[in-house]
Amino acid sequence: MEWIQYLQGLGVILLILSLLPVMAHFYRKYQLRGLLSHRIKVLEVKPISFKAQLLLIEVEGKRYLLGLTDKGLTLLTELKDGSTGSHSHPNA
């Protein structure tokens, strides 16, 4: 009689342990779905020095130029329609 209770307890423990990876998979899947927002897109990153970068991002259809340094993030400008195309520089 003791062996049957022991085996039942062991079976329950094994069942719980086998369900943990499945539950962890679904938890990560649904948690990441909320984090993967399609409203914010990084369109381009341009390094300008070792510790500074320019970022072109799009948020809900609007484009912004940001400066990123080791000190922080700065909004440089909001780009209006037509200002995101490539401009030829006379010295280029």
Image (spheres, rainbow, N blue to C red):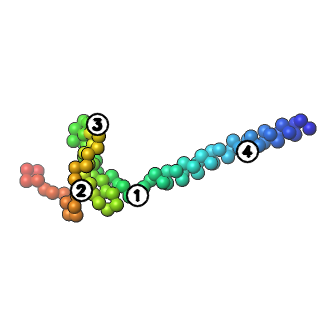
How far apart are the alpha carbons under marks 3 and 4? 49 Å
Tell me if 73 is positioned left or right of 14 in this view.
left
Callout 1 environment at 10 Å: few (<14), some (14 to 19), or many (20+)? Answer: few
| Residue assigned mark 4 | 15
Q: Which residue is mark 3?
A: 70
Helix, strand or loop at disc 4? Answer: helix
N-terminal of the pair, mark 4 or mark 2, is 4
Q: Which residue is mark 1?
A: 38
Residue, far bottom? 81
* The N terminus lies in quadrant: top right
In this rendering, position of residue 55 left or right of residue 87: right
Q: Could you tell me the amino acid type at mark 2? A: Glu
Q: Earlier in the sequence, mark 3 or mark 1?
A: 1
Residue 7 place in picture, x, y as percent? 83, 39
Label whose residue precedes the other's in the sequence (2 or 3): 3
The Cα atoms of the two marked residues, 2 and 1, are separated by 19 Å
**Which of pointers 3 and 4 lies earlier in the amino acid sequence?**
4
- Disc 4 crowd, CA 10 A, few/some/many (<14, 14-19, 20+): few
Tell me the tag on residue 78. Answer: 2
User: Mark 4 and mark 2: span between their CA atoms?
Assistant: 55 Å
Q: CA distance from mark 1 to mark 4?
A: 38 Å
